[in-house]
Image: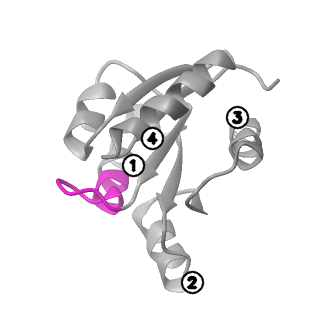
Amino acid sequence: MTQAKQILLVDDQADAIDALAMLLEMDGHTVRTAYSGADALAVVTTFIPDLALIDVSMPDMSGMDLARLLRGNPALANTRLIALTGHSRESDRKAATEAGFDTHVTKPVSADQLTRLIAQTG
């Protein structure tokens, strides 16, 4: 098992991230969920994640816009941002990097892939 991390999950598909949150918590991680960009901004006022997995396509605020806002917060300078998306073109990856994401992952994320992403987080 990797060292326990503080993880923020942001996705408008509540069932999916609630299930993922339960799995991560069973692995010993501290997890907060947000179902919109606005929710995520509220969460980070009191919770500084080591890692944030953010859906790129959300109705209220895109994950790209959220990443830019999070990158503007000095308290989150060491937070690793991972874009979760169904889009895997090179232009999508470039846009994610330009928005401030550290990694671009195409959905669905496998358990092994998630474990590696967490292990790579300082």
Q: Earlier in the sequence, mark 2 or mark 4?
A: 4
How far apart are the alpha carbons under marks 1 and 3?
17 Å
Identity of the residue drawn at 54% across and 23% down: 22
Check disc 1 and report its element: helix, strand or loop.
helix
Name the image quarter holding the N terminus.
top right
- Is residue 119 positioned above or below 66 on the image? above
Between circles 2 and 3, the one closer to the viewer is 2
Q: Nearer the viewer, mark 1 or mark 4?
A: 4
User: What residue is pinned by disc 2?
Assistant: 90
| Residue that badge 4 annotates | 16
* Residue 77 point in image, percent of width and height: 48, 40
Ranked by sequence position, the earlier of labels 1 and 3 is: 1
Label pair 3/4, CB-CB below 8 angstroms:
no
Q: Nearer the viewer, mark 3 or mark 4?
A: 4
Could you say which disc has been placed on residue 121 in the image? none
> Where does the image place residue 48, in percent across and percent down from the top left?
44, 25
Q: Quadrant of residue 18?
A: top left
Q: Assess whether mark 3 and mark 2 are in contact (beta carbons under 8 angstroms).
A: no
Residue at which label 1 appears: 71
Q: CB under 8 Å between callouts 1 and 4?
A: no
The amino acid on which the numbered mark 1 sits, given as a three-letter code, is Arg
Give the Cα distance between marks 2 and 3. 26 Å
What stretch of residues is rendered in magenta? 57-68
